[in-house]
Every structure is written in C-alpha cells, then in structure tokens.
Image: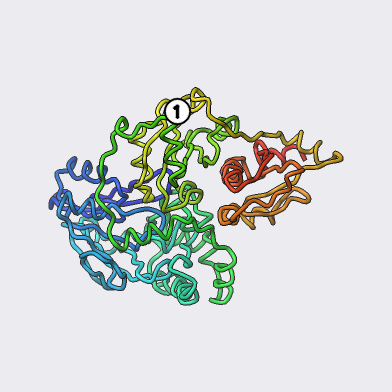
Amino acid sequence: MLFEQIKTNGLGCYSYVIGCPASGVVAVVDPRRDVDIYLQIANEYDLSITHIFETHVHADHVSGAQELRALTGAEICIHESTPINYEAIKLSDGDEFHFGNAILRVLHTPGHTPGSVSFLVTDLARSSLPSIILTGDLLFVGDIGRPDLPGDEILDEQVESLYNSLYKTLGDLPDYLEVYPAHGEGSLCGQGMSAKPSSTLGYERLTNPMLRFSDYKSFKQRVLSNLPMRPPSFEKIINTNLDGASISIKRVAEEHALSAEEAVAMYKEGATILDLRSALSFGAAHIPGSINVDFTDGPKLNWVGMATPPYKPLVLVLPSDQEFEAVCTELRRIGCDDVKGWLKGGFDTWLESGMETASFTYISATSLLEHLAGDNPPTLIDVRTPAEFNSTSIKDAVHVPIDLIISMDSCTNDAVTQTVVVCQSGFRAAIAASILQTKGCNDLTILSGGMIAWENIT
C-alpha cells in the first residue's frame, strides 16, 4: 500500500495519498488547492488518481478537489448530508472503496461539521484488519476539532455529536490504530495541537485531555469555554468549498507590477494593502492604511485570513526574498484570489516616490518597566487570548483580544498617552498595531519580545 502524508506549511493542514502501486490506482484525501504535489506522486509511481475524498467542508483552506478532478477526471466523494452545489459521490457510513490492496471504509463522525467523516484504512497486503484511521477534524494529536463553525443555531447539537463521535464511534475502535488528522500545529480548527504529525488511538486516550472526561456535561463545559478565534475569512472559504472552487489562473509578476501611484489608486478604490515584510521593517516605515503580517519566517496564512477583510482585493508589499507568483499560490490556499498586484521594487519604491509614511515604535521590557513606574505611564493593550491573559499579564493591562480589535469600528485609545501593544512574542502585537492604525489609533508602541521578554526581567 502507498500511504503519504503531505503537510501544508502556514496552515497546519495535512492531506493524504493512498493507493496500491501494484494495481495502478490511488486516492487523494483533503487536497490543498495547488495540486501539483499529488500529480507528482502519481506520476512517480505510475498511478491514476481515481477518487478525491473530503473528510468535511473545510473552513480554513480552499479545497483542491475541483482542480484535481479537472486534471485527472477523478470522482469527488463527500458525505451525503453536506449541502454542496457541485456533482459528487455521496458517502454513507460503512461505504468501502478498494484501491488494490488498500481499502477505505467510511465512518460518519459528525461534530466538527454535521457531514464530517473519518476513514478506516486497511492494507490487505498485511492484514484484513484496519491499521490507520484518518480522523479529519474530529480528532487531532493532542486536541479535538472545534464544533462552532457551522453556526450558533446548531452548536448544542454539534457538541453532542462531537462527544458521541469521539467517545462512542471511536470508542469501539482498537488502541493500535494509527491516527492521522487533517490538521496539526498552527491550525485554527482546534488548539493545543501537537507538532507530531500522527499518533495512535490508544496514546490519545491516555494523553489527550479532551478524551479523558467522565461525562458529557463536563466535556461540553470545557469545549464551550475554550473555543479558538474564528477568522473573518472562514465564512468565505466555507461558501467557496460548498460551491466548488474555481480553477487556478497563473499569475505573471510583470503583468501585475504596480507603481506607488497605482497602488494608491487601488487603495482608494477599496483594495487592502497587505505588507508582508518583517514586523520591525513595517514598524520603521510603511504605507498609511496598510496591514502587516510578517511572512519573512514563512507564510502565516491563518493570520492573513484573520487580519484582512475577506471580500476586498489585495495589493501586496513583498519582502525582498519573496516572489509574487509564489505568494499568490499561498494566498489562493485561503481563497485570496483577487490580488490586484504588487508594489514593484518593494517598499523602496514607495520611499522614492516621496509619499507619506506611517510608523510605530518598539520598547524593550526593561524600558517599559521604567515607564510604568513614572509619572505618565503608558496604556497597555494585551491582545492575547483569554487563556493566555488569565495565566499571566502585566498589572493594569487592558485585555482586548486581537479578534475584538479586528471587529472594532474605530480606535478608542487615549491620544494623550502612549499605547503599548502586548502579545506573547511580538508577532500578534505588530498585526494588531497595524490594524489599530487603520482605525485611527496614534502613538502606538510594541513591546519587543512580548510577554516572553517581560517575564524574563520580572
């Protein structure tokens, strides 16, 4: 049996290729939008991709199922309860699909979404017993899927389904099954996930805190008290996946290169200027009204989905080592198809144009400690999650989680005093500060190193 896990960096997504080289057939589970990797694997082993399975309608990334079907003729398969607007094979609990020695058996495991499924995988070359379970967004390594994405009106039903799928459907399965989820560390479809790409069902029963509740009531209380942030992009991505995503159009950099004047014109017409340079470079000088998500250490697509309005076109300011075409491929994974262009020559082009710039400053933990003891202490805004803030925080800091900052209509900070934005490391604080500036906040400062630095000196 051929079994390969593909990780998509920047999203924490996993997809899978499962098949039988001897029979020449293979299936893909939960494909990402850019599908070249699956075609390469199929070509390497001289296999035909015949089926594409979706464990559920994804909220955090656009599926590559439509593109893969267009290129291979493979059938798309999704649970029968899913209200899709495209043609597909409708899956039912207990259905089996054979790919030579590999068998996929469908388990209906609702809870993350009503139509969520898991797949038991058997390798007949070794045994007639299944050895792997693909759990989708039901069970992760170290955590479970969130139940709130389909909407508040069915949240109670979702939580109960989640419990039943985890404790009853999976409860009847053997400990030795290897667990391969649809997401890992970095995903916003759950939280507290391990960096490990797989586990076993027995080990998760021993160590996963969400599988150790003695009753449904305590399980429900914990789930509802610990829901992660929901990026504004999720609704658009869900709708795109229900309708079936459009086929990729290759972006040629020179055809989308913009002057400073052209970037301003597009901004005035409603585009969002997304600056992907380092937070320090952005803080030193940036285009007024632009939003910063630091891509210099790799793509941070969840944060693009969190920070940018989902239905607005984008104009990009790129780091010197990033290529326009590659960044567009990343952005298409979360449904950002409407990229108008990029500032040719980078931010230097803006500086050379003589146009206005904005900035914010950084302060060390040591300097902040001194300022807080002075006559005119700054206002502190802590943008971390409630769990982080309740665990440890700076005295008198105001807790405004970043998702609330995003939803604010206008800035409410005191224009007389300095405002210091705080997060765990400084990364989220830079995003939050850039958003606060677009809402009219002034005199913003970032705590360098965040709470990590603060705790090292206090």
Q: What residue lies at 43% left-to-right and 68% top-to-bottom?
A: 150
- The residue most toward the right is 375
Q: How is the image coloured?
A: rainbow
* 317 w.r.t. 416: above or below: above
Q: Is residue 432 left or right of residue 201?
A: right
Quadrant in the rendering for residue 202: bottom left
> Along the line of sight, which residue is nearer the eye, 236 or 262?
262
* 8 w.r.t. 54: above or below: above
Q: Is residue 278 left or right of residue 324?
A: right
User: Disc 1 designates what residue?
Assistant: 346
Crowding at dot 1, Cα within 10 Å, few <14 / some 14-19 / many 20+, comes out as some
Specify the quadrant that holds the C terminus.
top right
> Along the line of sight, which residue is nearer the eye, 418 or 426?
418
Give x and y (percent) for residue 370.
Answer: 81, 36
Give x and y (percent) for residue 70.
Answer: 18, 52
Q: What residue lies at 76% left-to-right and 37% top-to-bottom?
A: 368
Give x and y (percent) for residue 376.
Answer: 83, 41
Type of residue at label 1?
Answer: Gly
Q: What residue lies at 42% left-to-right and 48% top-to-bottom?
A: 11
